[in-house]
Each structure stands twice: as structure tokens, then as C-alpha cells.
Image: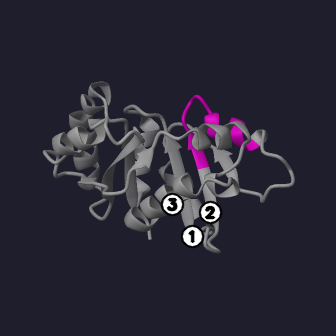
Amino acid sequence: MSLGNRVIIVDADDQKSVLTWYNNRPEDLPHIPVTGATGNIKAMLKEHEKSYDFVIADCAGRDSAEMRSGLMAADVFISPLRPSQMDLDVVPHTCSVFTAAKDFNEDVRGYLVLNMTPTNMFVNEANQAADVLKDYPEMRLASSRVCDRKAHRDAWAESMTIFETQNDKAQQEIESLVKEVIL
């Protein structure tokens, strides 16, 4: 779903899972530029901004130098979280870091995105989590949700994007999220 845009992914997570995904990507699939980075990534992100329409920085799911410096260059900050108490417990700190970053980058927009939500309509965790997240006005709660689908795990295992699979529901969820928070 690049929509003809030039996109690069910067893997700034010390686990380097995106780089592993990239290095395992079959050669017959379209090339997606991926690079690694550590520490202060602001200058690198700004430099890539000159050559790409979208620079996606994947930072660790915790407070880090990469996340804080990335926020200084970001247009959009997306914090994905599961509808679980463990993930909800870190939201106050995430919002605090985001609010501090806005002192230096006042135009950055922040979104909390419910990720890995149950597909079972009788499990109400996502709606319950959404009710809790409404108490954090520092960041917007995205109306788009990404469900816990095997298609995402399968795509990752094959080093594919969800748009290179045949799962329409998963594709629609990601497309909806991108349109809501980025486009």
C-alpha cells in the first residue's frame, strides 16, 4: 500500500526484527528499503526525509533514546498496544514522554492504536480498553483497530507485507489505520 510513495523503514529497535524480516525477504518480492539505527536517530530521520515521502521508524516498545530522539523528527507517533492491563499500565508514561516531546516538536501527532484485538465478537476487551484510553487526551485513540489475525503472523514468517497476502480483512484494517493516522 505504498500508493506510489517512496517509503523507507528505519529499524531502531535493538532486537532488529525488521532488519531480520528484510534480510529474509524473497528476492522476487518488491524491494522495500530498510536500514538500522541506534541512539539519537533524529538527524538520520531528517536526512531520509529529503529522499522519501514516508520514513517509518520502528522503535522498541519501551522508553528509549531512539524513541525520544525519533519523536523530535516525527510527524506522527503511533503507540500500538494490546487491550490488556499490562499494556494499559504503560500508557501514562507513554503519554508523558509524548507530551514532553511536543515541547520540542509541537506539530507531532500522537495516536494510541489498539492492536492484536480479539476477532471474537463476544470478547469485549478492546471496547473496555478503548473506554480507559479515552482518559488520555494527550494522544488520540485511533478508531481503526488491528485484529489478532494469523495472516499477520504468516506474512511476517514469509517476510511479506500484509498487502502481499490474500487476507482482505487484515489488509482493510491496515489500510484504514494508514488513512486515519498518516494520509
Q: Secondary structure at mark 2?
A: strand
Q: Which residues are magenta?
A: 10-22
Label 1 and label 2: CA atoms lie apart by: 6 Å
Q: Amino acid under label 2? A: Val
Task: Say which quadrant the N terminus sits in.
Answer: bottom right
* Residue for badge 1: 53
Q: How is the image coloured?
A: one colour
* Residue for badge 2: 7
For this orientation, the residue located farthest to the right is 28
Q: Crowding near pointer 2: few (<14 within 10 Å), some, many (20+)? A: some
Task: Say which quadrant the C terminus sits in.
Answer: bottom left
Q: Secondary structure at mark 1?
A: loop
Q: Between disc 2 and disc 3, whose residue precedes?
A: 2
Residue at 16% across, 48% down = 134
Vertical position of residue 109 compared to residue 65: above or below: below
The reply to whether dot 1 and dot 2 touch (C-beta < 8 Å) is yes
Label 2 and label 3: CA atoms lie apart by: 20 Å
Residue 34 placement (x, y as % from top left): 68, 50
Dividing the picture into quadrants, the one containing residue 52 is bottom right
Answer left or right for 4 relative to 106. right
Q: Crowding near pointer 1: few (<14 within 10 Å), some, many (20+)? A: some
